[in-house]
Amino acid sequence: MKIDRKIYILPIIILTSILVFSIVKIPSKTKSKNLNYMKIHYIDVGQGDSILIQTKNKNLLIDSGPGDNCSNIIKYLKSEKIKTLNYVIATHPHEDHIGAMSEIIKNFHVKKFYAPKITVNSSYFNNMITSLQNKNLKIIVPKPGDFFYLDKNTKCEILAPNSEHYENINNYSIVNKITHYNNKFIFTGDIEKIGELELLNSNFDLKCDVLKVAHHGSSSSSCEEFLEKTKAKVAIISCGKNNDYRHPNKKTLLNLEKNNMQIYRTDINGNVILISNGKKIVLSSK
């Protein structure tokens, strides 16, 4: 992965942070539909996950974040001129990942909806199902090895879940890998060590440039063997400021640092926005 070394002057609060990844303000022309850029937004939704991926013609949303942040995630998507979500992935049925999903379905034109084969008896899950039914949307349950294209040079491949039964709902998380020309990104949901070991025993290529750290940086995940296998240069942690779980765990941070990963956290850095041109990946100021 080549990293742009051009520095853009940012407010002092950012300059004094721990960021070491190249910071560049992307010219507005890079947003043109004539260019094959991919833009990934690791959205600050507090203690939860929500990731927007944009290519030339398509949008993918991975999770919605918690219900108490619903208005903010909808406002964010609308600020990006999102009207259609070609693909939505609900990684697993925990409130911090799908709490706002029913409102996402209501407010945007969703074409395809993916979720694992697991149900829970909760208001947020039932609301999501009701919203899907009202839009005549069926849940697609993906299998490892399934894939779809966001454009001809941007492939999204499903890597997990690799079993049908788990004791912990986190391990039902849909894990996917996006390949944009030469750049690779892995999104892990909340898989724990058992899910990571299943991936290590699979035939999937786990190498990536950017890793979305599993389970908000919890000690339950990010085992050393898995991190070593990914060979990621950048790690993104989505978690809430001063959250009750004390995410991310100190040991997880040490494991990431041990593998020489540059770490970005939504609780510290806010929205983390990456732009890929297929060869380089840059951190955008917006």
Image: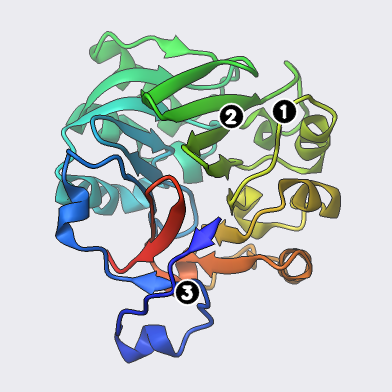
Alpha-carbon span between mark 1 and mark 2: 14 Å
Residue 201 left/right relative to 179: right
In contact (CB < 8 Å): disc 3 and disc 2: no
Q: Is residue 172 visible?
A: yes
Q: Which mark is residue 174?
A: 2
Q: Which of the pair 169/5 is nearer the observer? A: 5
Q: Quick one: label 3 or label 2, which is nearer the N terminus?
A: 2
In the rendered image, which quarter contains the N terminus?
bottom right
Residue drawn at (53%, 13%) of the image? 141
In contact (CB < 8 Å): disc 3 and disc 1: no
- State the SS at label 1: loop
For the residue marked with disc 3, what is the amino acid?
Ile
For the residue marked with disc 2, what is the amino acid?
Ile
Residue drawn at (45%, 90%) of the image? 16
**Residue 263, quarter of picture:** bottom right
* Nearer to us: label 3 or label 1: 1
List x then y, in percent, for residue 196. Answer: 77, 39
* Nearer to us: label 1 or label 2: 1
Identify the residue position indicated by label 3 in the image: 268
